[in-house]
Each structure stands twice: as structure tokens, then as C-alpha cells.
Amino acid sequence: ADLQVDKERQNFFESSLDYVYQIQEVQESKKFNIVEPVLAFLHSLFISNNLTVELTQDFLPYKQQLQLSLQNTRNHFSSTREEMEELKKRMKEAPQTCKLPGQPTIEGYLYTQEKWALGISWVKYYCQYEKETKMLTMTPMDQKPGAKQGPLDLTLKYCVRRKTESIDKRFCFDIETNERPGTITLQALSEANRRLWMEAMDGKEPIYHSPITKQEEMELNEVGFKFVRKCINVIETKGIKTEGLYRTVGSNIQVQKLLNAFFDPKCPGDVDFHSSDWDIKTITSSLKFYLRNLSEPVMTYRLHKELVSAAKSDNLDYRLGAIHSLVYKLPEKNREMLELLIRHLVNVCEHSKENLMTPSNMGVIFGPTLMRAQEDTVAAMMNIKFQNIVVEILIEHFIKIYSGPPEESSTPPVPPPRVTARRHKPITISKRFLREKTVFYTSSLDEREG
């Protein structure tokens, strides 16, 4: 019965996530699925009825702007779909649960490895763990004849996942307690169940010989700045014109090897980035890995909501002014790292004819890298595209933003009131004025139509 209830709860949770994801997808796709047929109808109307040249010319700028907006909206829709699916997957793997007052943090069946003179046996216990008191209560399920065993109360000291290759059983983890000497090995019912127990017990991963994700390694310290500068130097020297730069990922084994070598506590930073062992894909993937695994993102959790709120604004001047102001609210080392990265991304985008990496493409890649919500929620899923817009604005307005702080005040200006409802004016980066590249594109489109 318990398994059936848990299964139904999991199915309900997954169905809810799928429903929210599909609603968001339909809402975003409406922006171009409805407008495109209307645009095609108006275009055919002007052609078939042989309207005057004046009317056709009056309609032309609106058509060009609408075509550009539709194209950018489609690009953003396609680029964020994969990120939303990844976020949905992470939320399915670690569902949020509610805890009633007086209820244990976690409870369920576990098997305990017990050693006897004649060998080893696995005994089934019903376990309850209270995180606040670190008290683990174990009640044996297999009572021996003639012997009555009561619950065993243990105070937890430490919990660590058991290395897979160190034992012939799956889903195992080790604990240490105040009441028993040595290590107690427990076996969960599944991988997901083991993950829940370890999260409740603040379990740690086993230490291997070449760790790459220690907390002290993934910080904005001198070693981190040195790593980023070396990566940027090699990329801009050897591979800035590489097609699909930052979009194409490198070998995970090579990435781990590079990070292990550079962040080795014995000799940090002692790596030759110009060696033939490291190709451009490995270096770009290592840089993204470092930024994504910082204890706090470069643009901080504290300013995340304000940055997303600024990107949602319909008013372009307010949007730029607010982001400009918020950049100077970052801690000094974060602002220095952000300037270093955005300056590099500007250089990459200047070679977009060769590497095909435009500010919009770089925003899709570095939006989730430089910004992330503190918790994976449905709201975070819906705000992914606005993270991309923030990075895109930083790239396109780099000179203005980093020439100095805003003149009037460090507080962003209040946006003017919205005249129409937001649903009539979709928020996308495509609402900007046409740039030279855009004018060239639309003019070539007109030549083909002519």
C-alpha cells in the first residue's frame, strides 16, 4: 500500500510538471503560430489585389518589423525549450515533499550489514530519522524466536555514499554514530531512495584521488581568476573563429583532467594551456563548468529577481538602465569577473561571421551559466529566457554599461505605466530597434520578394 501511494504521488508530481511545461510551451508558441498566418494573409492580399504603390510602401516597414520579431521569437522559443526540459528533469529527480509537525524527516525500510563469525548477513529494519536531533531509530523487522528486540536509537555523526566498486550490493551508504564504534553500512531500496536518505542525513560523496568539485576550488578567488584569464587568452588567440564556439562541448574526460590538473592543491595553476592535450572545445567546456559550479553564480542570488524583473520590462530604456544600475550593485570581485567575461564575449561576437555566435546565441549559453535561481522551481523554469536576455543586453551595451555607473542614481528608474495588457505585447529581445545587420537582412528579403 505504501509503495502504491508513493507511486501515485510521484505520478501526480510528474504530471503536474508536464502540465506546467506544456502550458508554457503553448503560451510561447502562440506568439508566432497566430501572427504568422495573419502576416501571410496580408501579404497575399496586397499582391493579389494590386493595391497602389503608396499603400504597399506604407505597409512595408510594419511587415519588416513583424518578420524580424517573428524570427527572433522562434529562435528564443527553440533555444529555451532544451533548458526547460533539463530543469523539469532535475525537478523530477528531486521532488519537493512536505513534512507534517512531529513527523520524522524521513522513514522507511533499510537493510543493515551485520557481521557474524560465520559471515555477513543483511537484516531488514524499519528506520526513522529526525534531522533536527540527528536521531536514527531502527526497529528490526525479523524478530528471532524467543527474543524480543526493541527499537534501537542512534545519534548520527556522519554519512557518506558507499563507493560502487567497494561492495557487491547496490544503493549502499555508510554512517557513523555515537553509540556504536566503527561504520554501519545501510542499503536503500533504490537509487532514488538512497538519494533521499542521504539528503536528509546531509550525506557526502566519497573522496576519490582526483576531486574536481571541492567547495574551496569553485570560488571566485585568485586561482579562479587565473583560470578564467588563461582560458580566455587561449580561446582568443587560437580559436575565436571556430564555428560553434562554446556551443560545441568537449570530452568530459578531458575536461575533468584539465580541471584536476589546474586546481590541484599541491600546485594550483601549473598547467600549459597551449599544450596539444587541450583543444578549444575542452577549454571552453572547462570554463563553463567552472562558472556553473561556483558556490554562488557570478551575478549572485541576491540580485537574481531584480535582474529578471528588469529583463521582463516592455520599456527598452528602463530595461537597459535597470540592468546598468544592478551591475554596479554586484560585489567587487563579481563585477570584475563579469566584466572580464562580457568583454571576452563581445570579442567572440565580433567574429560572428566566422564562428556563427551572435549575442543572442551567447545569451542562450551564458544566461544559465552566469545566473541561476537559488531553488529549482516552476517560476525558475519560466524565467530562463529572461536570463538569456540579461546577458544579451550586457554584450550589446558593454561600452555604455562599463564606461561607469549610472549618472543620476544607483537606483533603477521607475518604468512608465503600461498602456496595454502584457499579453498583447510579448516580451522578447526582438522588440529592439533595427540595427544595421537587421536592415541588411530585411532589405535582402525584399529583393527576393521583388
Image (tube, rainbow, N blue to C red):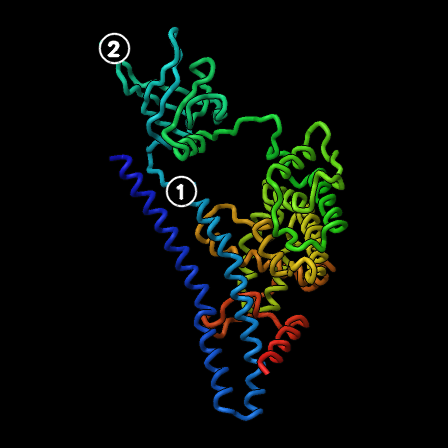
Q: Which badge, 2 or 1, is on the more N-terminal residue?
A: 1
Residue 230 location in percent, x, y? 74, 43
Q: Nearer the viewer, residue 338 or 141?
A: 141
Residue 448 x %, y %: 60, 78
Relative horizontal placement of residue 213, taking residue 397 as reference (left or right): left
| Residue under pointer 2 | 147
Q: Residues within 10 Å of mark 2 (few under 14, many from 20)?
A: few
| Quarter of the view holding residue 128 | top left
Residue 273 position in % (x across, y down): 74, 40
Amino acid type indicated by mark 1: Pro
> Circle 1 sits in a helix, a strand or a loop, which is it?
loop
- Horizontal and vertical percent position of residue 171: 42, 28
Return the residue at label 1: 95
The residue at 22%/9% (across/down) is: 146
The residue under the point 71% across, 42% down is: 225
**The disc labelled 2 sits on which kind of residue?**
Ala
Quadrant showing the C terminus: bottom right
Report the quarter where the N terminus lies.
top left
SS label for mark 2: loop
